[in-house]
Image: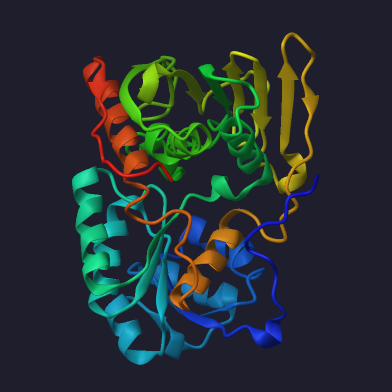
Amino acid sequence: MIVVTADSPQTPSTVPRTRLIHVGLGGWGGDWERNAIPPVTEVDRVAIVDAHEPTLRAAQEALDLPDEVCFTSLTEAARAVEAEGVIVTAPMTFHVPVAMEAFDAGLHVLVEKPFAGTVAEARTAVERAEELGLVLQVSQNYRFYPGAQKARELIAAGAVGDLSVVHVDFRRWDHDAPVETYRHYQFPHPLIYDMAIHHFDLLRMTTGREAVSVYAKVTDPPWSKYTEEASAVLVVELEGGLVASYRGSWVSRAPQTFWDGEWTFDGQDGYLTLTGRGDGPADDEVRLGLKGEVATPVELPALDLWGRSAGLRQFARAIRGGAAPDVTGRSNLGSIALMEAAAKSAETGKVEPVEQIGGTVA
């Protein structure tokens, strides 16, 4: 049966457009401009901001924008244009500072993952947004694909019985570029911060459980160009004693996974597999096998928007007084806590506890 999503389409003529400033126009910010923002008819990007002047001018040229909507400062942009919110796609170290600057200007914030490097830093923005009554949403876009949504639905419904173990594999080859020209090699924790945060968030979403502890063993080959971990094996203990294994790599020559990775949820009555987050929802697949049967594909939800675009529409509607986003700054703290503990474990070589946030798993 096709599942009807809560985010049903509306005709453009009946929907007020939410005015947004976009901060951070580097490589990923440019991708937002090309692929994530255009499908969302309910928003207008009214200005762009990048503190790096050459990046700003390159984006201005690519987007064919006049000088009066291009700025090197968010505060300056907020004074010059009428806006209601901000999309933050700057590097992670700037996420919370830019969010706080936006809050000072009375603007709502949609920020890319990872929201922050630590729970303590994230909390400062969460508490400020709540104090001011502003929306703080985190773009955990893997949640907005049909495979992940169907997996969560089936597991919550007990389709495979009580879960006994979860296995996740992520394999990509991202190692051809020269060291001198590829910033990804120098990212802090390029696997855990840049990619595994997606999988940590999906683990919480699909199982409905928070992480309790994590052990991370870095498995980098000696020829890796990455400054910090490009591959690792993790063991995550979740509430109720459920254990998840995670193998991730940016330097794998093995068959490449989709960005979601390859998931197996093993339960008392059967198992479920998930893969997806390719170029679109058509790449998603969920298979269900019960009591020794061969797993067969299940029908997935039909989505009119997916990924970052679906999250952006939620942001616009929340600003206009609609439902709260699926991933708020507060509900994302559990994912940040697991990421922070995993990074610490990769450095210490020890099992690390995951800070307990409290509340309901989002």
Q: Find residue 17 and report its image quarter.
A: bottom right
Q: Position of residue 136 (x, y in %)?
A: 36, 63
Q: Residue furthest toward the top?
A: 292
Residue at horizontal 79 percent and vertical 48 percent from the top: 2
The N terminus lies in quadrant: top right
Q: Find residue 217 and report its image quarter.
A: top left
Judged left or right of residue 161, residue 255 is right
> From the viewer's perspective, is residue 151 above or below residue 22?
above
> From the viewer's perspective, is residue 4 above or below residue 313?
above
Residue at horizontal 71 percent and vertical 32 percent from the top: 286
**Could one spot residue 73 in this view of the protein?**
no
**Could one spot residue 229 in this view of the protein?**
yes
Q: Where is residue 324 in the image (x, y as percent from the top left)?
A: 44, 64
Residue at horizontal 34 percent and vertical 55 percent from the top: 329
Q: Find residue 284 and report its image quarter.
A: top right
Q: Position of residue 41 (x, y in %)?
A: 65, 76
Residue at horizontal 27 percent and vertical 80 percent from the top: 105
- Which one is in front, 54 or 35? 35
Judged left or right of residue 144, residue 342 is left
